[in-house]
Image: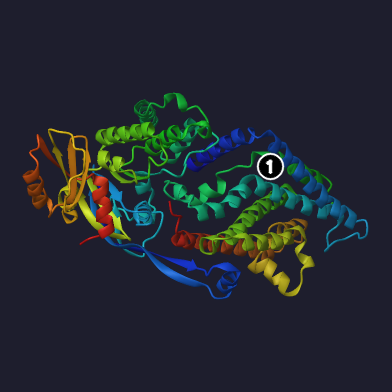
């Protein structure tokens, strides 16, 4: 409850601040809408030439695409701006003022800034997602839908964990740009169905850098047939990645040298 | 009684070095060289509840490193630290609820929001009971004379006002241990005075442990009966400020007030000190050892109306002391 109350403060602060900068507020909304149009347009064009993609029909693929747009919007709204700042906090010693507070430092630095201008985009992404679900020909029960939503939320948190794993090395390397660029390049794998990947790349994307588990695995579980192995794989890798991130975070804090005054 | 105990504390940093120029950068990319820099070396000290201690040293001496270790921000390489019975780098919430760190060069409040908004968040973070929160807001804003600025965005405040709202934010939860790192840096004289007055009053009222680092000797002189001198990471003095002046003040100033105005500077052996004149006054800056001989010589030549012997300013004594180190 205490952490919820703290988060409500963060929300209040972020909305007050975002509305101070009007131009930035509206520009961000326009930019994200363009991102949605480009992504949806890409698959629409693709389906003009083929009836199926990696075993999915167009209506199924649109649910998949709208799902990763939703994950992206959630990430941009809740975590992205905080994570953008973390390397600066580490290098400039600004992490000091978070470390002295009697509250989880990871919670504080991950959730402090809620991107209020991305919140409008989150609503747009949600609308696209609901509309894609409404057009889905595959029958599903409420239970299956709730399970799918749970898996998508898990994918959103996994996305956060993976990005943190790529950011935390800044405690040792000082510059996180290379890692960050690598994360974004690999992160594009989220936008494709995992069955299009073969061989070593598939092994990497489902186990080592499990971007394919963020949306593609949940979509496969949703469209069926849902296999226990697929679900166990999702749970085990997610837990493993959380463990790895927390371990790295603790090591990073131990290596933190702050900055001279 | 709570206290701080430090024993055998050392901290080293591994820093990369680079030859100048592009070639140096390429060499560094292939074969990076590192040097180990000792920021703290075998420091031991004890601070009792209610004490206000000044940490003095040149830039890079290790003062801030010491404060950051005590605050649990960085890990030491060696040594033991106990703050109110806790190991600070365990980052126990019980300890963190009882301490505050104020860095003169770093803002901790939300910049785009009024201070009162940030205080509401701090109330939640430190779980400050409503009654105490109101009492603290009332007391602190009153003593700091900052009531009217609490609803103004922090970024729109002057530097002095900003430091006051920062101080207020850091002390809202009434901490038992307060680390102040350069709290008056960059402030004008009036603001420095106001901050000092506030700290004095706060200390008298609540008796927390206060560790203060400052390059302004006025801060140390007014606030800290006890000082710790740090040079190149090592503790070279721990004791009363007045003792430094008495025991280690190498130089003395002898002033003779004469009946008549002097027109020319009299001849005086340079080895006995440096003589200066102004109106009817002759001033001699000499070493403690030479003082008697120099005074005998001057008193043989002049019959002054008044003779005074002054200790040099504390700033000079400490400067000398830091230059020479522990001898």
Q: Percent x, y for residue B94?
A: 35, 47
Q: Percent x, y for residue B288?
A: 14, 52
Compared across the picture, whether B30 is left or right of B247 comes to: right
* Residue A139 appears in the rendering: no
Q: Percent x, y for residue A224?
A: 77, 59
**Front one among B79 and A59:** B79
> In the structure shown, which secondary structural element does the residue marked by tag 1 occupy?
helix
The answer to which image quadrant residue B283 occupies is top left
Would you place residue A181 above or below residue A13 in this image?
below
**Front one among A156 and B158:** B158
Mark 1 Cα-neighbour bin, 10 Å: few <14, some 14–19, many ≥20: many
Colour setting? rainbow
Compared across the picture, whether B120 is left or right of A155 comes to: left
Image mark 1: chain: A
Compared across the picture, whether B17 is left or right of B297 comes to: right
Q: Percent x, y for residue A65?
A: 78, 53
Residue at the outermost right position: A49
Residue at the outermost front position: B263
Residue at left 77%, top 50%?
Answer: A66
Residue at left 83%, top 59%?
Answer: A56
Would you place residue B211 above or below residue B44 in this image?
above
**Front one among B271 and B231:** B271
Residue at left 38%, top 41%?
Answer: B183
The answer to which image quadrant residue B135 occupies is top left
* Residue B216 appears in the rendering: yes
Mark 1 highlights which residue? A118
């Amino acid at each position: 409850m205490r952490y919820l109350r703290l988060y409500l403060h963060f929300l209040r602060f972020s909305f007050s601040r975002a509305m101070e900068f009007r131009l930035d507020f509206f520009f961000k909304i326009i930019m994200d809408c363009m991102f949605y149009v480009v992504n949806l347009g890409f698959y629409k064009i693709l389906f003009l030439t083929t009836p199926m993609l990696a075993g999915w029909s167009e209506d199924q693929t649109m649910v998949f695409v709208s799902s990763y747009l939703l994950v992206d919007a959630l990430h941009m709204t809740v975590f992205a701006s905080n994570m953008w700042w973390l390397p600066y906090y580490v290098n400039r010693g600004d992490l000091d003022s978070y470390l002295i507070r009697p509250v989880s430092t990871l919670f504080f630095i991950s959730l402090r800034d809620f991107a209020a201008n991305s919140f409008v985009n989150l609503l747009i992404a949600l609308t696209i997602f609901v509309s894609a679900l409404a057009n889905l020909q595959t029958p599903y029960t409420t239970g299956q839908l709730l399970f799918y939503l749970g898996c998508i939320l898990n994918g959103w948190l996994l996305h956060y964990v993976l990005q943190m794993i790529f950011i935390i090395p800044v405690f040792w390397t000082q510059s996180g740009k290379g890692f960050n660029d690598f994360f974004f390049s690999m992160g594009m794998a989220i936008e494709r169905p995992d069955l299009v990947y073969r061989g070593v790349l598939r092994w990497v994307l489902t186990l080592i850098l499990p971007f394919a588990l963020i949306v593609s695995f949940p979509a496969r579980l949703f469209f069926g047939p849902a296999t226990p192995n697929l679900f166990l794989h999702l749970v085990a890798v997610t837990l493993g990645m959380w463990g790895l991130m927390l371990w790295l975070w603790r090591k990073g804090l131990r290596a933190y040298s702050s900055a001279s005054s | 009684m709570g206290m701080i105990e430090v024993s055998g504390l050392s901290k080293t940093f591994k820093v990369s070095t680079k030859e100048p120029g592009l070639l140096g950068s390429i060499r560094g990319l292939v074969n990076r060289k590192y040097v180990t820099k000792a920021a703290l070396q075998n420091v031991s000290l004890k601070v009792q509840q209610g004490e206000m201690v000044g940490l003095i040293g040149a830039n890079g001496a290790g003062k801030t490193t010491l404060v950051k270790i005590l605050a649990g921000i960085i890990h030491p390489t060696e040594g033991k630290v106990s703050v109110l019975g806790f190991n600070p780098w365990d980052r126990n919430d019980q300890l963190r609820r009882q301490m505050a760190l104020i860095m003169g060069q770093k803002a901790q409040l939300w910049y785009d929001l009024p201070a009162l908004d940030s205080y509401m968040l701090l109330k939640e973070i430190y779980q400050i009971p409503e009654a105490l929160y109101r009492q603290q807001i009332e007391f602190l804003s009153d003593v700091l004379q900052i009531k009217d600025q609490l609803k103004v965005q922090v970024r729109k405040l002057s530097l002095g006002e900003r430091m006051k709202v920062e101080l207020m934010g850091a002390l809202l939860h009434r901490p038992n241990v307060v680390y102040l790192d350069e709290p008056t840096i960059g402030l004008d004289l009036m603001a420095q005075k106001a901050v000092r007055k506030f700290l004095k009053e706060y200390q008298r009222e609540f008796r927390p442990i206060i560790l203060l680092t400052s390059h302004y000797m006025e801060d140390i002189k007014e606030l800290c009966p006890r000082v710790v001198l740090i040079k190149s990471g090592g503790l070279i003095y721990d004791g009363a400020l007045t003792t430094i002046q008495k025991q280690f003040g190498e130089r003395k100033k002898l002033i003779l007030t004469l009946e008549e105005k002097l027109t020319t500077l009299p001849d005086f052996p340079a080895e006995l000190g440096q003589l200066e004149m102004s109106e009817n006054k002759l001033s001699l800056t000499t070493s403690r050892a030479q003082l008697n001989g120099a005074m005998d010589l001057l008193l043989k030549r002049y019959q002054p109306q008044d003779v005074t012997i002054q200790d040099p300013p504390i700033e000079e004594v400490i400067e000398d002391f830091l230059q020479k180190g522990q001898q």
